[in-house]
Image: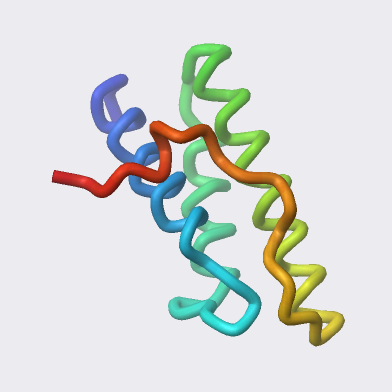
Amino acid sequence: MNHHDVEQELQHLEYVFAHLSPKSTVPPLGYWRGRLNSLRKIPIVPSQRERINRLEQLLGTLELAVASGSESTPKETLPRAATRSRR
């Protein structure tokens, strides 16, 4: 996976994670965990690593909310650029 592919994948995951909620987890959260884990296995730049870490924190919060039956969404939000619609 080249730098451009990694960037596209991160943008997609940031967009999706901005729209996930404990009530709306289709595909299941394990699917998104697997996509994040696959990015951990390839060489990436530090700024991309930070974005992956932020996504993992959001996913962990969401996983806890689902496990506890909570309907609240994670309090941390993604940067504004990550929530723009894809064109």
Q: Is residue 71 left or right of residue 68?
A: left
Q: Residue 61 placed where, x, y %?
A: 76, 59
Q: Is residue 32 above or below residue 42?
A: below
Q: Is residue 45 above or below residue 33?
A: above
Q: Residue 16 placed where, x, y %?
A: 42, 57
Q: Is residue 46 left or right of residue 9?
A: right
Q: Quadrant of residue 29?
A: bottom right
Q: Quadrant of residue 82?
A: top left
Q: Is residue 10 left or right of residue 18?
A: left
Tell me the residue at 60%/84% (across/down). Answer: 23
* Of the pair 31 and 23, the residue shown nearer to us: 23
Going by the picture, which residue comes out furthest to the top? 46
User: What quarter of the picture does the N terminus occupy?
Assistant: top left
Q: Is residue 71 left or right of residue 39?
A: right
**Coloration mode:** rainbow
User: What quarter of the picture does the C terminus occupy?
Assistant: top left
Tell me the residue at 40%/45% (across/down). Answer: 83
Going by the picture, which residue comes out furthest to the right? 68
Q: Residue 40 placed where, x, y %?
A: 56, 35
Going by the picture, which residue comes out furthest to the left? 87
User: Total label count?
Assistant: 0
Tell me the residue at 57%/47% (across/down). Answer: 37
Tell me the residue at 51%/55% (across/down). Answer: 17
Q: Residue 69 placed where, x, y %?
A: 80, 86
